[in-house]
Image (cartoon, helix red, strand yellow):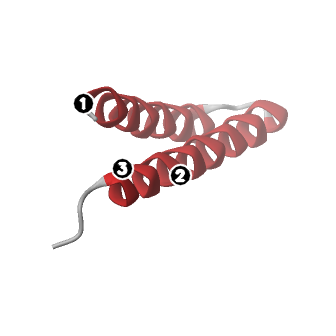
Amino acid sequence: MQDMKAHLEKLRVEAEECELISKLATNTTKKQLFAKLAEHHRMLAHEVERAINASQPKA
């Protein structure tokens, strides 16, 4: 479980970094690419978070 939580945190950080690069990019192609990568990392983080929540015992 700890490895999944670590991976989740890594994906969130990568999404934020891609978002920042997108905002700072002066080239339109790079701006769009990094915005798309940020969204992709957020989607992956959401999927990992769902998997973590699904594997936890229900109260």
Query: Disc 2 marks which amino acid?
Result: Glu
Q: Is residue 17 above or below residue 44?
A: above
Indicate the amino acid at tag 3. Ile
Residue at point 81% right, 38% down? 28
Q: Residue furthest bottom?
A: 59
Instruction: Tell me, for residue 32, which label it has, or none.
Output: none
Where residue 30 appears, x then y in whole percent? 76, 30
Mark 1 nearby-residue class (10 Å; few <14, some 14–19, many ≥20) = few
Count neighbours of disc 3 (C-alpha within 10 A) and say few if under 14, some if 14 to 19, many if 20 or more: some
Foreground residue among 50 and 40: 50
Amino acid type, callout 1: Gln
Dot 2 crowding, Cα within 10 Å, few <14, some 14–19, many 20+ = few
Direction left: furthest residue: 59
Number of numbered discs? 3
- Which residue, given by chain and number where applicable, does mark 3 sit on? 52
Q: Which mark is residue 2?
A: 1
Quote the CA–CA distance across marks 2 and 1.
16 Å
Pinpoint residue 37: horizontal percent, then vertical percent: 67, 38
The picture quadrant where one finds residue 36 is: top right
In primary-sequence order, the first of circles 2 and 3 is 2
Rendered view: 23 above or below 58: above
Query: Which is nearer the N-term, disc 3 or disc 1?
Result: 1
Describe residue 22's horizontal placement relative to residue 32 as left or right.
Answer: left
Q: Marks 2/3: CA distance?
A: 9 Å
